[in-house]
Amino acid sequence: MRKVSAVTDTADVNGEFTNGNVAQGVPPTILDSAIFNTWQRELVNIVTSSGMDLDPNDDGQILKAINKLLSVAAAVTSVNNKKGAVTLSAADVNAWNKTEADSRFIYKDGDEINWLAVNSMDYIIKRGLQDVVNNERQTNGMRIQGAGNLFVDIYQHERIGQYHFFGIHVANGDAGGWYEFRNDGSFNAGGTVGAGGGNGSKLHPDGNIEGSQWGGYLSNWLNNNISNAQNNAQNWAYQNLVQGVRLSGRTVIRDSSGRIDLPSGCVYTGMSGANYNPDIWAAYSAVQVLINGQWATIGTV
């Protein structure tokens, strides 16, 4: 519940109403709708929490609601068949008493649980779970509790119909990291797998590899080097391989009644008539290739 000072700055130092004092410059408290809504909600909650519906024609509902709530509280006379001033035991709330708990938990150096001696740790909890949840079953395991929120779970686990694994879960008040040694010989981790310390190589969950051999991520090294190789191959091909072939413009020569040799790299592209006649003609064109951005006439072998 809030005071009137929560909705106006004209309340007094105690957060309460004031009549004000004009002579001393103290303003009277402004009656804002928000404070009336607060009081109404508080009163409505009393009525509705008792199970009654609001009745605009009944001005005695607040009293009825209080009496009803008090009668309900008075009706609770026993807990687990214990009457009067009840003192609950561990069994009343389905819990272990101290003796039962001490047989299940250890918490100091020198304590032992089965084969495992406890040294330099707060406590170890041994569990033997057989419950099947979401098609999974944990057969046995234990927890090593460290300082603060640090703990390590070591356990054998089964994903039914799939595989068994020996698991380790390390956490410090959060989801932490997990590691699985599976019965098929594989190793799986919930995060990055590293080698060589903090600055060594890393295998990331997305399959990327990071290390000094690659100058960072292997994917970046491959992309850069493949791109460079492609550019080098394209440049070499552009400079040395033929990118196009064409015939040059046609040249016409007259019949000279003798042998006609064409220039190197040229071929006949047309001729007409027979025997000697100056009007009889032949035509040829040079065969050209495009290399390194330039057209060149081929040579004759």
Image (cartoon, helix red, strand yellow):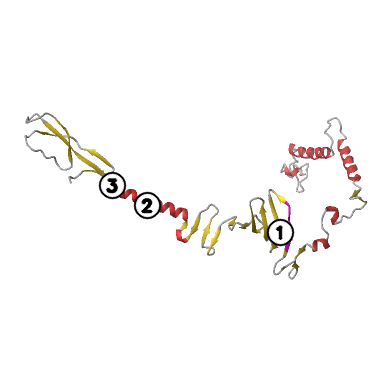
Answer with left or right where residue 67 lies relative to residue 273.
Answer: right
Residue 241 is marked as 3
- Element marked by disc 3: loop
Name the kind of residue labelled 2 in the image.
Ala
Q: At 83% from the left edge and 53% from the top edge, which residue is drawn?
A: 93
Q: Quadrant of residue 283?
A: top left
Which of discs 1 and 2 lies nearer the camera? The answer is: 1
Residue 229 is marked as 2
Answer with left or right where residue 183 lies relative to residue 230.
Answer: right
Q: Which class describes the residues within 10 Å of circle 2: few (<14), some (14-19), or many (20+)?
A: few
Q: CA distance from mark 3 to mark 2?
A: 17 Å
Residue 140 is marked as 1
* Residue range (magenta): 124-131
Whether residue 115 is situated above or below residue 279 in the rendered picture: below
Residue 49: image x %, image y %? 82, 40
Q: CA distance from mark 1 to mark 3?
A: 70 Å
Give the mark, 1 or 3, whose residue is nearer the N terminus. 1
Q: In the orientation shown, which residue stands out farthest toward the bottom?
A: 110
Q: How many marks?
A: 3
Which residue is more in the foreground, 293 or 277? Answer: 277
Residue 3: image x %, image y %? 77, 44
Say whether residue 276 is magenta.
no
Q: Which class describes the residues within 10 Å of circle 1: few (<14), some (14-19), or many (20+)?
A: some
Q: At 73% from the left edge and 61% from the top edge, which residue is drawn?
A: 126
Locate the N terminus and report the quarter of the image it occupies.
top right
Residue 263 is marked as none
Name the kind of residue labelled 3 in the image.
Leu
Residue 56: image x %, image y %? 83, 31
Give the mark, 3 or 2, whose residue is nearer the N terminus. 2
Say whether residue 128 is magenta.
yes
Which residue is more in the foreground, 15 or 55? Answer: 55
Q: CA distance from mark 1 to mark 2?
A: 55 Å
